[in-house]
Amino acid sequence: LEYKGYAYQNMQIDGIFSNRKFNGTFTANDPNLIGSLDGVIDLEGESPHFDLLVYLDKIDFKKTNFTNENIDFKGILEFDFYGNDLDNFNGTAQIKEADIFHDGLRLPFDSLRLQSSTEGDRKTISLKSNY
């Protein structure tokens, strides 16, 4: 698998893709990306549904060509939402137990939670962080 000019190694997908719905796991044991994903991505309905749990033990954003700066991340990501952009986002996306390093220095960040709900014609969005 290659993305943005970086060739990933030791990637494995185990799951079922049927009726525009993936249910399964993805694991990465690359020198610059170590982690796992477990869950469901459902593209069948009017709005896509993501119900995922991601454990990232390590990602080096510079070496994987996502950024030109030295940024490393590890943490847990939980997604349970419908939608494919902020206008139709409904549900929760959160980062927890996170460590972010910029040029080797740990940034003061541990968690971030984005939650959105719609009731009638009123949409509520909340963003919470430990920082």
Image (spheres, rainbow, N blue to C red):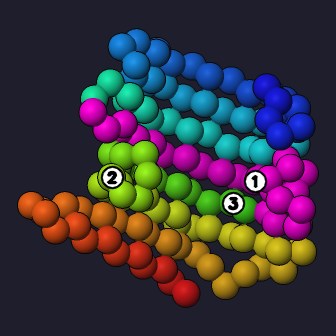
Residue placed most toward the observer, 62 or 47: 47
CA distance for labels 3 and 2 = 28 Å
Residue 4 counted in the magenta span:
no
Q: Which residue is mark 3?
A: 74
Q: Which residues are magenta?
A: 46-72
Residue visible at 44% across and 52% down?
85
Of labels 2 and 1, the one closer to you: 2
| Residue 17 seen in render | yes
Q: Position of residue 56 (x, y in %)?
A: 65, 51
Q: Are marks 1 and 3 in contact (CB under 8 Å)?
A: yes
- Amino acid, disc 3: Lys
| Residue bearing mark 1 | 58
Disc assigned to residue 88: 2
Left or right: residue 16 versus residue 82 is: right
Crowd rating for badge 2 (residues with CA inside 10 Å; few <14, some 14–19, many 20+): some
- Residue at the spot 62% in from the left edge and 22% down from the top edge: 13
